[in-house]
Amino acid sequence: LVEEFRISLFAQELGTVRPVSAKRLDTLWQSV
């Protein structure tokens, strides 16, 4: 998921497999 977030930031034309955002990562990180 972190790698997909990096792609969404720096290589947007490639796209990602699933939707990813800073908010999603933060929520996921809080649950760990």
Image (tube, rainbow, N blue to C red):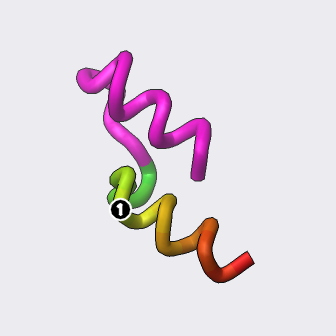
**Residue extending furthest bottom?**
31
Mark 1 residue element: helix
**Residue extending furthest top?**
10
Residue nearest the observer in this picture, 29 or 16 = 29
Picture residue at 60% right of the left edge, 37% below the top? 3
For the record, the magenta segment spans: 1-16
Q: Is residue 27 magenta?
A: no
- Give the image location of residue 19, x and y in percent: 34, 59
Residue pointed to by mark 1: 23
Q: Quadrant of residue 28?
A: bottom right
Note whether 27 is above or below 17 in the view shown.
below
**Residue extending furthest right?**
32
User: Which residue type does callout 1 highlight?
Assistant: Lys
Please rate how many residues cluster around mark 1, counting C-alpha atoms within 10 Å: few if below 14, some from 14 to 19, many from 20. Answer: few
Query: In the image, 1: left or right of 14?
Result: right
Q: Quadrant of residue 18?
A: bottom left
- Give the image location of residue 4, x and y in percent: 51, 41
Residue nearest the observer in this picture, 25 or 1 = 25
Query: In the image, 25: left or right of 15?
Result: right
- Give the image location of residue 30, x and y in percent: 60, 74
Picture residue at 44% right of the left edge, 28% below the top? 7
